[in-house]
Amino acid sequence: MWTPSTRVAGGVTALGGVCVALAALPTDWFGPRPTDSYVFDPPRFSALWVERTVIPVVAIAAALLLLVGLLALFYRDRARLPRWQRWFAVVAVVGTAVGALATMLVLTAGGRPTADPTAALNVLLGVALGLLGALLALPGLVAWGAGYLQSGHRRLGTALVGGPAGTALVLAVNVAAGVSFGAVGGLVFALPTAVAALLVGHDLWTRAPAG
């Protein structure tokens, strides 16, 4: 049977998936972008205000909530995972943590980092950490998920493998095939991760430790 804390973690993870999708919504959907003097002081709830004020907070929340979800999943199942899968899970969690730190560094630098050397340094450090986090998290998640697929937990395994694989596929279609997703491009890239988070959250909410 699940424990209350696991159910809470499941809800938190699912909320992280929703935040991933919300952070990737085209800001034009929130209305026209102000111009002229309003660029420096956009009206509240305008598209530019949402982009500068709301989206960074939602994106940081998404990164942290997904990290909490992976930590909860690892804590729940660690005792029953084979050693190789446990190590890949640790790599995935560390990579996600590094990615969450990178997200915070970049998004807290402000809209004009070139005007502040410290902010510019934070952006550069955040980009470097983001690349490192991706190099750790992506193969870690795929291998962690492959272990679940091998043990018969198809939905959870598909979520962990499908999130990175889906994002990589969208990127390949965008770059190699030259397919442009237009204004909704960010949302298309985010959807595999959002769906994966919802599936992991559902698993944490409903299922006992993997065995």
Image (tube, grey):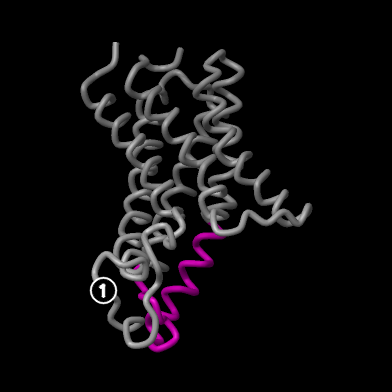
For the point 54% across and 40% down, the residue is: 192
Q: Quadrant of residue 198?
A: top left
For the point 40% across and 36% down, the residue is: 70
Front-most of residues 176 and 128 = 176
Residue 33 within the segment the image draws in magenta: no
Q: Is residue 47 above or below residue 118?
A: above
Question: Does residue 148 appear to the left or right of 19 in the view shown?
Answer: right
Query: Magenta residues, as a range?
Result: 108-132
Helix, strand or loop: magenta stretch:
helix
Locate residue 147, reporting x and y percent. 58, 24
Locate residue 182, reporting x and y percent. 61, 58
Give the amino acid at mark 1: Pro
Disc 1: which residue: 43
Q: Is residue 191 above or below residue 161?
A: below
Question: Does residue 156 appear to the left or right of 172 in the view shown?
Answer: left
Count residues near mark 1 (Cα–Cα under 10 Å), then give few for <14, some for 14-19, many for 20+.
Answer: some
Question: Does residue 113 appear to the left or right of 140 in the view shown?
Answer: left
Front-most of residues 188 and 1 = 188
The quadrant the N terminus occupies is top left
For the point 51% across and 47% down, the residue is: 190
Outermost residue to the right:
177
Outermost residue to the front:
32
Residue 123 within the segment the image draws in magenta: yes
Locate residue 75, reporting x and y percent. 35, 29
